[in-house]
Image (tube, helix red, strand yellow):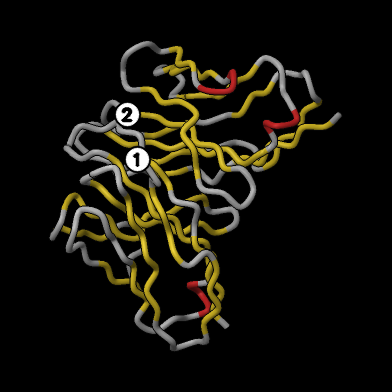
Amino acid sequence: NAGVTQTPKFQVLKTGQSMTLQCAQDMNHEYMSWYRQDPGMGLRLIHYSVGAGITDQGEVPNGYNVSRSTTEDFPLRLLSAAPSQTSVYFCASSYGGLAGGKTQYFGPGTRLLVL
Amino acid sequence: AQSVTQLGSHVSVSEGALVLLRCNYSSSVPPYLFWYVQYPNQGLQLLLKYTSAATLVKGINGFEAEFKKSETSFHLTKPSAHMSDAAEYFCAVSDAGGGNKLTFGTGTQLKVEL
C-alpha cells in the first residue's frame, strides 16, 4: 500500500493563480480531509468528506473548494491564490462512521508559497 | 466546541532524561484523544490514542499517556529521551458522535540534547 499520497510536494504561485492539490489513498477509507499547517497554529481543518459525493466545510474553508467523485481521490482547489494561503497542506484519511477514535493517516504534505 | 491546549511550544531535554509534554482538553462530551508526531519535512504519524478503554495508553517508541478526566489532561511521557525523539508533537481531540473531525493543539517542538 502506498497509503496517502500528495502531489506536488512543493509549489510556487503568483497571487490570483489557480491550482489543484492532489490527494489519493489506496486504503479504501471513506473519510478524507484537508488541513493546513501554519507556524504556531497547529493544523486546522479546511474541508472534509465522509464518502464519495459528500463534502463539508471545516474550520477555515474560505478560498478553497473540494469535490469527491471517487473513494480514492480528494483534490483541493485554490481558485485565486492569495499570500495568506502560503502554508503546508496535509491530506488525511481514515475509516468512516460517526463513532470517533479512528486513526487518521496523513500524507507527506504539499508546501505552497504564494507570492 | 472542543479544544486542546498544549503548554510549552518548545521543550528541551537531555538524552536519557524524562520527556513530559503537556496537553489539556476541553470537550462537552467524552473525548477521544490523540498524540501525533511530526518529524522534519514529513507528515504526521500516530503515537497513541485514548478511546475510553484503559486510561493509561501505551504507544510506539516507548511513549505513553494517561487520561485524567478530573484534570482534563492527556500528558505524553517517555522515561528516557533519545536523540531520535526530536520532533514536533501534536495533541488532538475528537468527540463521540463527531465522526473523525480532529481539533489539534498548536504543537510542542521537542529538542533532545547530548
User: Splitting the image into 4 quarters, where does residue B87 fall?
Assistant: top right
Q: Secondary structure at mark 2?
A: strand
Q: Which residue reaches farthest left?
A: A53
For mark 1, name the chain: B
Point out residue A51 in the picture as x, y percentages from the top left corner: 16, 51
Query: If the image is split into quadrants, where does the N terminus of chain A sit?
Result: top left
- First in sequence: mark 1 vs mark 2: 1
Q: Nearer the viewer, mark 1 or mark 2?
A: 2
Residue on which disc 1 sits: B2
Q: Are marks 1 and 2 in contact (CB under 8 Å)?
A: yes
Q: At x 56% / y 74%, what residue is drawn? A: A113
Residue A72 placement, left or right of A9: left
Q: Residues within 10 Å of mark 2 (few under 14, many from 20)?
A: many
Q: Residues within 10 Å of mark 1 (few under 14, many from 20)?
A: some
Query: If the image is split into quadrants, where does the C terminus of chain A sit?
Result: bottom right
Point out residue A84 in the picture as x, y percentages from the top left corner: 50, 74
Q: Is residue A53 above or below residue B36?
A: below
Q: At x 22% / y 66%, what residue is drawn? A: A67
For mark 2, name the chain: B
Circle 2: residue type:
Pro
Residue A83 placement, left or right of A93: right
Circle 1: residue type:
Gln
Residue on which disc 2 sits: B31
